[in-house]
Amino acid sequence: MFGSIFLERLVSQSAQRRERAAMEDATTVATEAIVSIRTVQSLGLLVTFSPVVFSLPSGRHMVVSVAGVERVFLRRFEEALARAHAAVAPGGWWRGLVLGLDLYVPFMIFCSVLVYGAILVAREGFAYNNVMLVNGALMYGAYMLGQALVMAPGFDAARMCSARILAVVHREPKVKTEEGVKDNENWAATGSFSIKNVEFSYPTRPHQRILKGVNLEVKAGQTVALVGSSGCGKSTILQLLQRYYDPDSGTIELDGREVRATLSLVRLRRQLGVVQQEPVLFNRSLAENIAYGDTAREVPMNEIIDCAKAADIHNFILTLPQGYETNLGASGAQLSGGQKQRVCIARALLRRPRLLLLDEATSALDANSEKAVTRALERAAEGRTCVTVAHRLSTIKDADLICVLDKGKIVERGTHAQLLSLQGRYWRMCRGQHAA
Ligand SMILES: Nc1ncnc2c1ncn2[C@@H]1O[C@H](COP(=O)(O)OP(=O)(O)OP(=O)(O)O)[C@@H](O)[C@H]1O
């Protein structure tokens, strides 16, 4: 029985690994398709409906009518389930054998002990009550061992799951508050920052240098725009400012303090408000979504309303039947792109950031929404430092400093007028967009 426990564990361990990998694949496909349900449906619109039959690991079948691209997703899902099924099936036979042994061995022991005990009693005058005693002990022991065997696969699965959970729990992030850095809760930046000789490669592509010696000095209250062709490293600079990564060499300073060596991560990020191209909202009320800007305190309603006004979304919120209590649904599905973006601006403003980072905040919007969001952003940028990444040059004409990046280097810098008079790269970009 011990031997079968050992073998069963060997077989089920490798099967569980394969099953888990296949089930993860299936879940990824399903999650991807459900999260992007509109895209999936829109891509599949033109194709006629036809039935697809699924074999589930349980052995049952499921018939679903699907179209076009949706069908592709379902097919991928089915293939992943089939792999999970293939991983589990051989293990199932083996488990069946072990369970059969569980039932067979105790009865075999019972019979053997009775026969052998009877022989001992008849031939050697062995006390019959000892035979009963040994029989009972063996039967009970074997029964208990069998019970433990039934639990063995579940125990192994639980052990493997806990190992994965603990690996995540104990994972040390590479970017963290450095040892010995004391956090001063009352410290607030004025908003000036500098980037000195920063070189950087993403850890997943260490040989591809993204920033190659970037230098930038920005005074408190200034608006600086980063422009350049796609992939030149604009968003990467914003990520380094937020310390999602640390530069390979060079330094980033906020108010003259090197962010890595002198500021705690929480204090640094407390100074920043970020608005990204894709607004991210939670399945909560409008008020809660805005209040998430500052989770360190209970945000009073009047402050939420002030930020919504500054972000130019207050009047729209008042037209909703439930006003600030309106639940936004998953990913803010009940708002337009421009409205979502303005809620995100209100959330960023609630942090009272000293440094506002705008990563192509208007590029996903139509002309009307863009105007409303640009207005809100201009108001939001008043009195604070603002770093904006933009493709549409018309939106950054008034910036105090425009930096043109190319292949990880700032190749031109100055105001809109200065850069136009240079007739260099910026000038050519403006001519391409008719923004000169
Ligand atoms: N997490 C990442 N891991 C590896 N490489 C990355 C990662 N994020 C971005 N990159 C690469 O870094 C380079 C610069 O990306 P970045 O997002 O900074 O460009 P960008 O100038 O903001 O481009 P865009 O204007 O298209 O948003 C690109 O070549 C991109 O493929």
Image (tube, grey):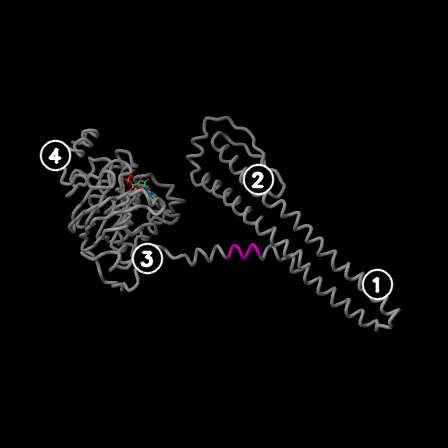
Q: Mark 1 belongs to which amino acid? A: Val
Q: Mark 4: which secondary structure?
A: helix
Q: Which residue is mark 2?
A: 82
Q: Quadrant of the C terminus?
A: top left
Disc nearest the viewer among 1 and 4: 1
> How many marks overall?
4
| Side of 181 relative to 97 (left or right) | left
How far apart in space, not on screen, are marks 1 and 4 (Cα)?
106 Å
From the viewer's perspective, is residue 232 above or below residue 94? above
Rendering coords of residue 163 (x, y %): 50, 57
Q: Which residue is mark 4?
A: 422
How far apart in space, not on screen, are marks 2 and 1 (Cα)?
49 Å
Q: Which residue is mark 1?
A: 115
How far apart in space, not on screen, are marks 4 and 3 (Cα)?
42 Å
Q: Which residues are magenta?
A: 156-162
Rendering coords of residue 252 (x, y %): 22, 52
Prevalent SS, magenta region: helix
Mark 1, residues whose alpha carbon is within 10 Å: few (<14), some, or many (≥20)? few
Of the residues under marks 2 and 3, which one precedes in the sequence? 2
Mark 1 CB within 8 Å of ligand 1: no
How far apart in space, not on screen, are marks 4 and 2 (Cα)?
63 Å
Disc nearest the viewer among 2 and 1: 1
Q: Mark 3 belongs to which amino acid? A: Lys
